[in-house]
Amino acid sequence: QLHFVESGGGLVQPGGSLRLSCAVSGITLDDYAIGWFRRAPGKQREAISCIYYNGEANSTDYLHSVKGRFTISADIAKNTVYLQMNNLKPEDTGVYYCARDFRLYPVVCTLMNGRYDYWGQGTQVTVSS
């Protein structure tokens, strides 16, 4: 059974950093891509980053507004995906979720919401002074 557990959220000042973790069970990271999503207050959930571990060169992608500040990575041995978030801004505030891209062996990951099915419960990130 698929299970995703996010952790690492919290309250941080603008300019600060957090590292989110997504512990995955029921699938392995070299079979499916994993995405990170954010639901900001009053807004729809949006995809912010994704990763597919293909054994040689990971496929990754980022929402334009987080590119250069956020870094996604995967630890295959721990079956865990991380999102390192640096230089956080108030507009990064929201609930962060990880989810599975339902395509098996996708080659490249995608930020298309419609490709994702199983979701975690989310972790709250608040950026405020």
Image (cartoon, rainbow, N blue to C red):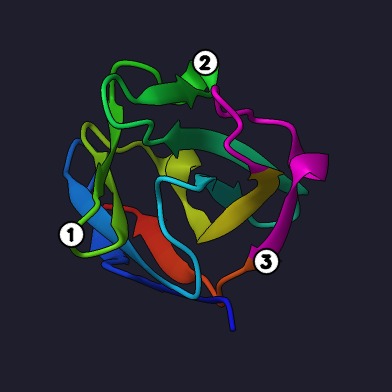
Of labels 1 and 3, the one closer to you: 1
Residue at image mark 1: 77
Three-letter code for the amino acid on which mark 2 is drawn:
His
Residue at image mark 2: 64
SS for callout 3: strand
Badge 2: few (under 14), some or many (20 or more) residues near its Cα, within 10 Å? few
Q: Quadrant of residue 59?
A: top left
Q: Earlier in the sequence, mark 3 or mark 2?
A: 2
x 67%, y 41%: residue: 46
The answer for how far apart the CA atoms under marks 3 and 2 are is: 24 Å
Q: Which residues are magenta?
A: 104-118
Q: Earlier in the sequence, mark 2 or mark 1?
A: 2
| Left or right of residue 125, residue 39 in this image | right
x 42%, y 24%: residue: 60
Residue 114 counted in the magenta span: yes
The answer for how far apart the CA atoms under marks 2 and 1 are is: 30 Å
Q: Tag count in the figure?
A: 3
Q: Earlier in the sequence, mark 1 or mark 3?
A: 1
Disc 2 vs disc 1: Cβ atoms closer than 8 Å? no
Three-letter code for the amino acid on which mark 1 is drawn:
Ala
Residue 22 % position (x, y):
37, 63
Quick one: 72 or 89, which is closer to the camera? 72
x 32%, y 66%: residue: 9
